[in-house]
Amino acid sequence: MPARPQPAPLETDAVIIGAGPVGLFQVFELGLLEARAHVIDALPQVGGQPVALYPGKPIYDIPALAVCTGQELADALMRQIAPFEPVFHLGQQVSHLARQADGRFLVETTAGTRLMARAVFIAAGVGAFQPRPLKAPGAAGLEGTHLLYHLPPPARLAGQRVVVAGGGDQALEWAIRLASATGHDAPACVTLLHRRDAFTAAPETVARMRALSEAGSLRLAFGPLAGLEAEHGRLTRLTYTGADGATQFLPVDTLLASQGMSPRLGPVADWGLAMERKQLVVDTEKFQTSEPGIFAVGDINTYPGKKKLILCGFHEATLAAYGALPYLFPGKDVFFQYTTTSPRLHRLLGVAPEAADDPPPASDGA
């Protein structure tokens, strides 16, 4: 049979690889320049490392915010970029990146998404975060069906016996959310399984979990997971080793495993970009890589004096957006303007009524 023709790629101004805080802020800076952006991330949700690894733990060095959690930071950034309507492609990884004859870039993902962009911004942090697979007898044949590494939509677990395995922020947040569910989408029962009665999650998260346990909404089980048992391809129960060394059995329909995340650089290393110690080499004028039109911001890049801080990534995203203007809008003059005073930017942000024309930019940029 002849190969099925591929659909035409979606055309956009920019593709951003990575939906962590720096990737989300890159959307904002591009939006101020009226550049449309599609965002790709291997994780099923936005927020990158702060949300995947420590959603409830405090962050103290975001300008103007005395303290916020990783989840709160991601939520705030999503509100900030909402006026620009970025398109997200989550749960997929870039598998192919190639310059085309007209100078644009074809970007393809593991999910079959095809994009054509004038510029590419790599904000992949230390790599694409992937869940650490559960290494237990019987696990391999159940992955993706009854053994999951991400929290699915509530309806997927309705009426089921659910076990959450893990002791970090993510595991406890999953258990709390499921144990607090009501109505038709609520699981039949929820159990949190951890190797010992001590957790690495934030204290307030642990307190919420224990309150649900005391109320009888959440069951707790302690001991190392020993194996999974299935009948006709369906998970029926798991075994774990109790404190007395005896094997314990726990009935289960779906197991949610939260064993941490591990970063993988993935295909970035195969794109022919100059690298140094698994990081992309960039200039400090516009944070462009060795390939014109491809920029790298955040923890994925390196340059003299580099500091791996979110606030530094925000600075890099700003200069990268302006550095990409010759590729995004060839031959177009774009004047630097302040969000405080520019009617054009106010319209883009949705904070001012339409006006006929912007005043000419001041010569000093004020």
Image (spheres, rainbow, N blue to C red):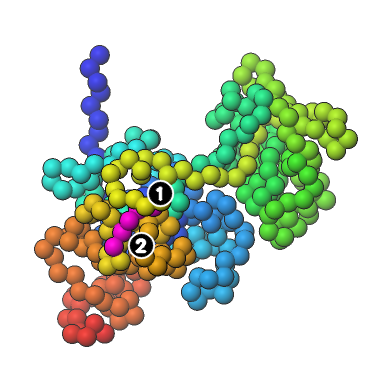
Position in image of residue 322 (x %, y %): 25, 66
Front residue of this view, candidates 55 and 151: 55
Magenta residues (range): 278-283
Q: Is residue 45 above or below residue 304?
A: above
Does residue 229 appear left or right of residue 34 in this picture? right
The residue positioned farthest toward the right in the image shown: 244
Q: Pick whichever, 127 or 307, lies toward us.
A: 307
Question: Up-down: is 356 above or below 162?
Answer: below
Q: The residue under label 2 is which amino acid type?
A: Tyr
Residue occupying the far top of the picture: 1
Q: Is residue 35 magenta?
A: no
Cα distance, mark 1 to mark 2? 13 Å
Q: Residue furthest left?
A: 331
Q: For the point 57% across and 75% down, which residue is it?
A: 66
In the figure, is residue 160 to the left or right of 283?
A: right
Label 1 Cα crowd, 10 Å radius (few <14 / some 14-19 / many 20+): some
At x 11% / y 63%, what residue is drawn?
Answer: 331
Q: Which mark is residue 278?
A: 1
The residue at 50%/76% (across/down) is 64
* Residue designated by label 2: 303
- Viewer-proximal residue among 293 and 12: 293
Q: How many marks?
A: 2
Is residue 16 something that shows in the picture?
Answer: no
SS for tag 2?
A: loop
- Figure quadrant of the N terminus: top left
Q: Amino acid at mark 1?
A: Lys
